[in-house]
Image: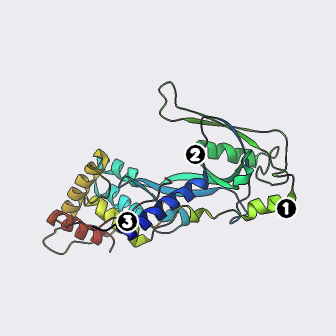
Amino acid sequence: MSTNIDAIRARLNKLQGTQKTADSLWKPTVGKHQIRLVPYKFNKDIPFIELYFHYNINNKSYLSPASFGRPDPIVEFAEKLKRMGGKDDYREAKKMEPKLRTFVPVIVRGQESEGVKFWGFGKTVYQELLGYFADPDYGDLSDPFSGRDIVVDYAAAEGGASYPTTTIRVKPTTTKLHENDEKIKELIGNEKEITTIYSELSYDELKKILENWLAGNTTDEGAQSATQETLVAKTEKSVSDSFDFDTKPHQLDDEIPQKATQQELPWDETPSAPVSKTTQQVADAFEDLFK
């Protein structure tokens, strides 16, 4: 039996792509770090980049097209599920909705040679940073000539806390990003676009992923999580109650909203799987939801 060279190349490309993504992101480790926010080359009006991610689909993370104002089939299905069921269905549908993750380009002090990286954070840090930008005593922290460095203090979860904590402190003195003006231009000029790190799947690709997940087809090893099993069961029941699989399903009258209200791991393509009768029924009803 000969070695599958194409499979080895595919694995190598995947590992190299993962490494490239990791090199472009900055994740603080426990302790204090000094960083400098810099302008985003691809949107000079504001350095912050708001992205929405699905975290509860197929045990993977998917960038939502809603990040760019485009229709998201997972959001559309969640809205349908909320209208079709009771409180439990509503809660499960809410878990399917994308969550906000904000990114900003930064230079890590002491690691300037590594270039601009993207720092991702949640709502609390985002609001605090926006507050500094809106304060006339601080202004534009990302200005490469008159901005300010930021001390980021990252602490592990302690005392029963579920999550680590991030505290920021803006330095009182304004400084240049780099003493050499040409180096400043080089650092900002070599920035990557965020979409080279997080790729957006097409509407049809996301729709197929959702359909396979609801039907119980998954590429992850082991059984599905309890949340997925619950949602699949509830979805099958809701769809069964709403459609007659022996005749042509009835189309719902209400319109599907087209706009939604964020991990950093690449995902695999979902392979084809034998289609059972139940799977086919769910697929047929699922397809009708999007007509």
Would residue 218 appear left or right of 268 to someone viewing this image?
A: left
Residue 168: image x %, image y %? 68, 38
Q: CA distance from mark 1 to mark 3?
A: 43 Å
Q: CA distance from mark 3 to mark 2?
A: 31 Å
Residue 229: image x %, image y %? 26, 50
Residue at numbered disc 1: 182
Residue at numbered disc 2: 123
The picture quadrant where one finds residue 272 is: bottom left
For label 1, the SS is helix
What mark, if any, has residue 269 been given in the picture? Answer: 3
Q: CA distance from mark 1 to mark 2?
A: 35 Å
Report the amino acid beneath label 1. Answer: Glu
For label 2, the SS is helix
Report the amino acid beneath label 3. Answer: Glu
- Seen at 28% across and 45% down, the residue is 226
| Residue density around tag 2, few if under 14, some if 14–19, many if 20 or more, within 10 Å | few
| Residue density around tag 1, few if under 14, some if 14–19, many if 20 or more, within 10 Å | few
